[in-house]
Image (cartoon, helix red, strand yellow):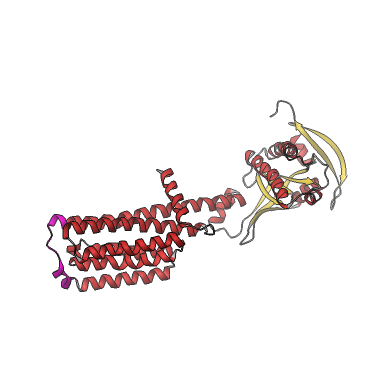
Amino acid sequence: MTQMLSDVRARLERLGSLETDTFEDRRHKVTLLVLTGTSLFASVLWGTMYFAILGPTITVFITFGFTLVVGAALLIFFATRRFVLLLYPFFIMILWNPIAMQWSLGGFAASGVVMTWSVLAPFCALLFQTQRKAMWWFAAYLALLAASLVFDHQVQQWAPPLAHRTSMLFFGMNIIGPSVVIFLTMMYFVNAFQREHERSESLLLNILPAPIAERLKEGHEVIADAHGEVTILFADIVNFTALAAQRGPEQLVILLNAVFSAFDQLTERYGLEKIKTVGDAYMVAAGLPDPRPDHAEATADLALDMQAETARISEEFGVPLGLRIGINTGPVVAGVIGERKFAYDLWGDSVNTASRMESQGVENCIQLTESTYERLKSTFLCDERGTIPIKGKAEMQTYFLVRRQTGDR
C-alpha cells in the first residue's frame, strides 16, 4: 500500500511540478491534484446519478458545470503547471457550486445537505494559503450557509418529489463524499509532512548529537556541559593546498568527499561524535555527550582505520594522500553556539593540545599525548617519540600509536 501511494505521488509530481519547484511547492501541487481529482470524480458520479433520477434538470447542468470548469482548469494547469490557475477556479467552484445545487434541489432536506462539499474551500485554504486568506474563505462559507438557512423555506418549493430512500441516498453520499476527500487529502498531506519532518530530523542529527538535538528542541536556550574526561582526535591531509592546486574544483571536491565520507562511516561505526570539518581537517570526540569508559580505545581504533581508508582511497584515485593525526585525552566544555547556523563545539586546553598533536605530528603517523598513552598502553602497541616543543606550551612527552596488541581486538 505504501509503495503504491509513493508511486502515485511520484507520477503526480512529474505531471504537475517544475524542476525549479521546492519541496513545499511539490507537496501543495500534488495535494491539490488529489483534491481536484477526487472532486471531479464525485461531480461526474453525482451528475450521472441526478440525471438518472431527475432527468435533464438545472441541478444536472450545475453539477456538470463544476466538472467542465474544474476540468478545464486542470488541463490548463497541466499545460502551464501554474498553481494559482487551478487553485482559484477550484476554490470558487467548490464553494459556490454545491450551494447552487442545494438551492436547485429544494434546500437542506431535499438535497441531502449537498452544501457540505462547500466546507472544502476554507479547509483547502488552510492547507494552501495563509490563515488570513483562509479566514476570508471561511467567512464566505458562513455567509452562504446563513443565506441558505434564511431562504431554505422559499427554495423548498423547487424540491422534486423523491422517495425517502432516495433522499437518504443523497444524504449519505453528501456526508461520505466530503469525508473521503478530506481523509485522502489529509492522508497525503500528513505523509508528506512526515517525510519532511524525517528529513529535517536527519539534517539536524547531521549537525548535532541526538541528545543535544533533543534538548534544543525542548527549548533549552543555553546548552553547555563540562566533561571531565574525553578523547579528541584531529586529522589533516598533508600538503592538501599543493594537491588542490593540481586538480580542478570538481575533482578536488570528489576526492575530499570520498575521504570524509569514509571517515564519517568509521565515526558512526565506533559510536563517536564528529564535531566538524574545517577545510581538509577533521575533528572527532569520544566520551560525549554521553560518557563512555572506552573513549580512548575507540578513538585509537578509529585513527588506525582512518589511516587504512586514506591509503585505500589514495590507491583508488591514484593520488598520494598523507594523513597526520593527533589525539589527546582530558576535560573539555561542550555546547551549542549560534542562533541560525548553530554548531556543537568543544573548548578547553585539551582541545588545543589535541590540535597541536596533529599540527606538529608526522605524516602517516598518529601522535598521542602522555594522557592518552596511559589509557592505551595496555591494549595498544605504541612507540615513544620523546619530548618535543609544543607551540604555546612547554615541551611535552609524546608517543606514536602503531597498532592494537595481538588478540586485544
Q: Can residue 208 be seen in this view?
A: no
Which sits in the foreground, 267 or 112? 112
Tally of numbered tags: 0
In percent of the image, x 13 and y 70: which residue is there?
Answer: 157
Coordinates of residue 32 in the picture (x, y in percent): 40, 59
Please provide percent x and percent y for residue 283.
71, 48
Q: Could you say which is closer to the camera, residue 94 or residue 337?
A: 94
Q: Which residue lies at the image location 62% right of the left edge and 45% below the top edge?
A: 290
Residue 398 as seen in the image, left or right of residue 204: right
Quarter of the figure with the N terminus: top left
Instruction: Report x, y in % for residue 111.
Output: 20, 63
**Which residue is at 38% across, 55% downward?**
34
In the image, residue 249 above or below residue 270: below
Q: Which of 350 and 238 is in front in this view?
A: 238
- Residue 148, quarter of the rendered image: bottom left
Q: In this view, does 32 lie to the left or right of 364?
A: left
Q: Does 1 appear above or below 164?
A: above
Q: Quadrant of the C terminus?
A: top right
Whole-percent x, y for residue 115 in the image: 26, 64
Residue 335, magenta (yes or no):
no
Which residues make up the magenta segment? 152-167
The residue lying toward the viewer, choosing from 377 and 14, is 14
**Residue drawn at x 50%, y 53% as measured from the top left:** 197
Vertical comparison of 37 with 93: above or below: above
Magenta-colored stretch includes residue 156: yes
Chief SS of the magenta region: helix
Residue sitting at the far top: 407
Q: Is residue 103 visible?
A: yes
Q: Is residue 16 left or right of residue 69?
A: right
